[in-house]
Amino acid sequence: MILTKAQYDEIAQCLVSVPPTRQSLRKLKQRFPSQSQATLLSIFSQEYQKHIKRTHAKHHTSEAIESYYQRYLNGVGRNGTAPVLLELANEVDYAPSLMARIILERFLQEHEETPPSKSVINSMLRDPSQIPDGVLANQVYQCIVNDCCYGPLVDCIKHAIGHEHEVLLRDMLLEKNLSFLDEDQLRAKGYDKTPDFILQVPVVMLCPLAVEGHIIHWIESKASFGDECSHHAYLHDQFWSYWNRFGPGLVIYWYGFIQELDCNRERGILLKACFPTDIVTLCHSVA
């Protein structure tokens, strides 16, 4: 789904005052029925993450942490089974999983002899049964399963979706009888930054693809929507590095992108929202 900047801004504006809940996502789908659920979810998640980054610092002052912790203690003191942490996160407009991390760290600081390491915290968030307090373990669990933008559960889902689309792209390349090297094979050859696939015939022949008149040597799969913030970061951190090393390439944003971002075609980076059907294999010998 390719959106104009104006279309994207209209969707983003609707997200300014809504909480990051599944109910909000359903309302967003009703407001924009022509957009796919996957595209809206990706935009929804990315916009909320931008909001969290902007407001992150205020939730991590010593005063804020102590206030949240005391409110948590008072809440579970009244009713330990109520979703105290989840409601607190929603009230102060902070991601439930991140609120759970704050309270868990504060709890462990109070009850453990040494400050908890990041790895210990991460392990407890992935498996709340490791938390040495049953009430807090339940509160953390409620936050994790009800957070649709952050947390270990979301991370696992995103990783699985990303892998699924890489497998899908691999199958499409095989179906077209295109020879390629994948990311693991490239890293085994000593490359550090690599795209998902380099298109080539092994040893002596190189087969770039011609897509809409543009030759490409590599393909990168992104199981997300390409907005300005993420795309510019990818250009800086990944795409131009690939271009410098391997030549022109193609980025597939499976959930769409802002149309105006596809402005580097002549420089050698193309954007698509699906695997191209209008491809021509160009073979030439490598000197």
Image: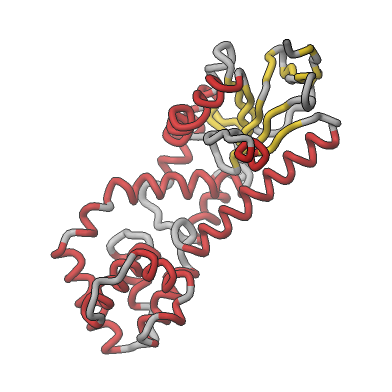
> Residue 17, image x and y in percent?
36, 50
Q: Nearer the viewer, residue 26 or 240?
A: 240
Residue furthest to the left in view is: 63
Which image quadrant: the N terminus? top right
Which image quadrant: the C terminus? top right
> Residue 116, image x and y in percent?
29, 71
Q: 249 left or right of 77?
A: right
Q: Nearer the viewer, residue 102 or 28?
A: 102
Rendered position, 140 above or below 48: below
Q: 17 left or right of 193?
A: left
Does the rendering let one see residue 254? no
Rendered position, 228 above or below 184: above
Q: Place residue 266 in its image quadrant.
A: top right
Q: Nearer the viewer, residue 244 or 263?
A: 244
Q: Place residue 86 in its image quadrant.
A: bottom left
Residue plotted at (68% across, 45% down): 165
Does the rendering let one see residue 64? yes
> Residue 78, image x and y in percent?
27, 89
> Residue 195, image x and y in percent?
60, 33
Q: How is the image coloured?
A: secondary structure
Rendered position, 168 above or below 109: above
